[in-house]
Amino acid sequence: MRNIKSYKSITPTIKENCYIDDSAVLYGDITLEQDVSIWPLVAARGDVNTISIGARTNVQDGSVLHVTRKSKGNPNGNPLIIGEDVTVGHKAMLHGCQLGNRILVGMGAIIMDGVIVNDDVIIGAGSLVPPNKVLESGYLYVGNPAKQARPLKESELAFLTISSQNYVKLKNEYIEEHS
Ligand SMILES: CC(C)(COP(=O)(O)OP(=O)(O)OC[C@H]1O[C@@H](n2cnc3c(N)ncnc32)[C@H](O)[C@@H]1OP(=O)(O)O)[C@@H](O)C(=O)NCCC(=O)NCCS
């Protein structure tokens, strides 16, 4: 595919049943586990470090994914690691951070280098998570800078998995219609 490109001879690894919109671009050392969906106009560059995206995660339209190179002061740099069943809302910016499983990143949120988001978290639309913050499992975070707002309700915790299942179903429909 013309939108899936190598960098220094490393080409993205794409496991079974992934959907990548033709207008998205993926460069370099990126791994997509099965059933991942990448929606229109996503830009993901695994050039100066690696990007991995866990099974059933969706990255919605216009999101930007990038990483930070290794350096003397930061020997591993900052790879981008996204877990399973994560929903990344439209136009989010994920840079060199680590997300666990069953997370919702609200539309337009910015998550900066070295941030660790533990499992089962919602980050409100438009929030900014500053470098190296650790977000506790089971909470809603909102604002700029993002602050812990309240524990998630049972319905919201359940929704995290429902959202990823909805996106798996949606991308299956897109695959069927466009293949
Ligand atoms: C934060 C969110 C989960 C709603 O939480 P909530 O507790 O139900 O929020 P409420 O609507 O009850 O509002 C509570 C307060 O938070 C404020 N608020 C809501 N969303 C906010 C956000 N993203 N950032 C900052 N403040 C927010 C409301 O204005 C309200 O303020 P007030 O008490 O001063 O009136 C939701 O607004 C959100 O951002 N969802 C993300 C959706 C998304 O982007 N999905 C991905 C695409 S599918």
Image (spheres, rainbow, N blue to C red):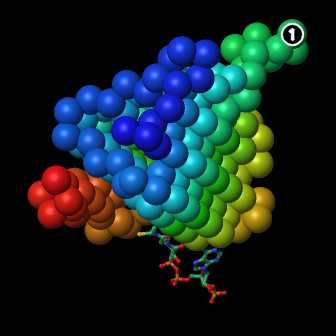
Residue at image location 63% in from the left, 61% down from the top:
109
Image quarter for ligand 1 equals: bottom right
- Disc 1, SS: loop
Can residue 27 be seen from the camera position used here? yes
Nearer to me, 104 or 7: 7
Q: Residue at x 56, y 42 (%)?
A: 44
Q: Position of residue 177 (x, y in %)?
A: 15, 63
Q: Does residue 31 appear left or right of residue 62 in this picture?
A: left
Relative to residue 53, is residue 11 depicted above or below?
above
Which quadrant holds the N terminus?
A: top left
Q: Is residue 116 above or below residue 77?
A: below
Residue 148 image offset from top left, x and y in percent: 63, 59
Q: Nearer the viewer, residue 32 or 141?
A: 32
Mark 1: amino acid: Lys
Q: Residues within 10 Å of mark 1 (few under 14, many from 20)?
A: few
Q: Residue 130 vs residue 172: left or right?
A: right
Q: Quadrant of residue 14?
A: top left
Q: Which residue is mark 1?
A: 72
Residue 90 place in picture, x, y as percent: 51, 66
Q: Residue at x 20, y 59 (%)?
A: 178
Q: Residue at x 20, y 33 (%)?
A: 16
Can you see residue 133? no
Farthest front residue in view: 2
